[in-house]
Amino acid sequence: MSVKLSTRQVGDVTVIDVSGRITLGEGSSALRDALRELTAKGNKKILLNLSDVSYIDSSGIGELVSGFTSVANQGGTLKLLGLTKRVKDLLQITKLYTVFDVHEEEAHAVRSFA
Amino acid sequence: MALDTGASEIHDRHYPSTLESVDLAEAEILKAAEKAGFDEDDQHRISMAARECLVNAVVHGNRYNRRKKVHVHISLSGTRLTIRITDEGEGFEVQEVPDPLNDTNILRHSGRGLFLMGAFMDDMKVRKVEPAGTEVTLVKEIGPHP
């Protein structure tokens, strides 16, 4: 299953619901394009919902990191929501878990942007 | 009399250097891991390590050159699954690959593939092959491991 992304607005926070696999090729480029489009439109508060992401490879991790830094460089914030155990483990062993602001509940995550 | 190592070959194929090949070979490796009896978490680790290795072979080794092949060999010996992935690229020095856990590299876009292979497998060996290419051997044992 390749990646699927859909965007919705919760107050002033833009939530990107991601499902499937974020891997080299279509998956990672779709995420990159979505984040670029949102930052180009001036969205500053972005919440990436990864609860339906089954698999991320190192290319996908690279896109998360690049997204995080590019949103921050434009004065915005990118946060993560709903990591599966496997994705959480992956971010922990790559020492990236503490780099991101990670949330388990959407309402809590949205409030944290205020 | 020939020495019987007890190893059985599960898969042996040369793939063209495309991302489609990465998906196909990864599926074969996952199938082999499942058949060998690894639990779901280990199947995921093996699949992920193999994918990183296959991507390196196609992208960095063979640079998408369709005339160059990626050789995938999978064998099972008792509880030990061995995956050997060989490209026909120019090769690289493992010791020159930056440590992705170093604070200065932590926010780099790339460079985590080799580290993940080592983290998810019990053993990993990288060697140059003649006349050109890199062979990576990934090993995983069924059962308790660190």
Image (cartoon, coloured by chain):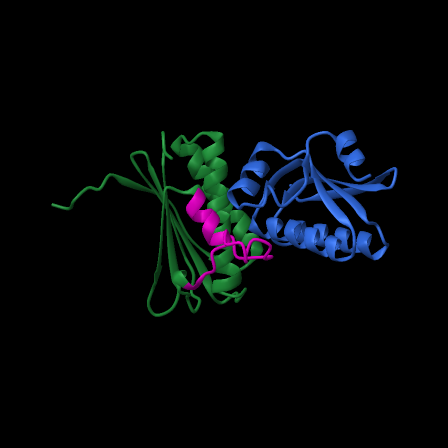
Chain colours: A blue, B green
Q: Which residues are magenta?
A: B96-119
Seen in the picture, residue B124 relative to B95 is either above or below; the reply is above
Image quadrant assignment for residue A85: top right
Q: Is residue B25 visible?
A: no
Image quadrant assignment for residue A104: top right
Please report the residue visible at 46 percent of the width from the left and 53 percent of the height from the top. Answer: B114
Please report the residue visible at 36 percent of the width from the left and 29 percent of the height from the top. Answer: B144
Seen in the picture, residue B30 relative to B144 is either above or below; the reply is below
Apparent side of residue B84 relative to residue B5 in the rendered image (left or right)? right
Apparent side of residue B113 relative to residue B7 in the rendered image (left or right)? right
Q: Position of residue B100 (x, y in %)?
A: 51, 54
| Viewer-nearest residue: B54 or A104 | A104
Q: Position of residue B146 (x, y in %)?
A: 38, 35
Apparent side of residue A112 relative to residue A84 in the rendered image (left or right)? right
Q: Point out the image quarter for the C terminus of chain A.
A: top right
| Viewer-nearest residue: A89 or B103 | B103
Q: Point out the image quarter for the N terminus of chain A.
A: top right
| Viewer-nearest residue: A67 or B140 | A67
| Viewer-nearest residue: A93 or B75 | A93
**Residue sitting farthest toward the left:** B1
- Identify the main secondary structure in magenta: loop
Q: Is residue B56 visible?
A: yes
Seen in the picture, residue B56 relative to B32 is either above or below; the reply is below
Q: Quick check: is B98 in the magenta stretch?
A: yes
Q: Quick check: is A21 in the magenta stretch?
A: no
Please report the residue visible at 52 percent of the width from the left and 53 percent of the height from the top. Answer: B112
Please report the residue visible at 87 percent of the width from the left and 41 percent of the height from the top. Answer: A12
Q: Position of residue A111 (x, y in %)?
A: 80, 34
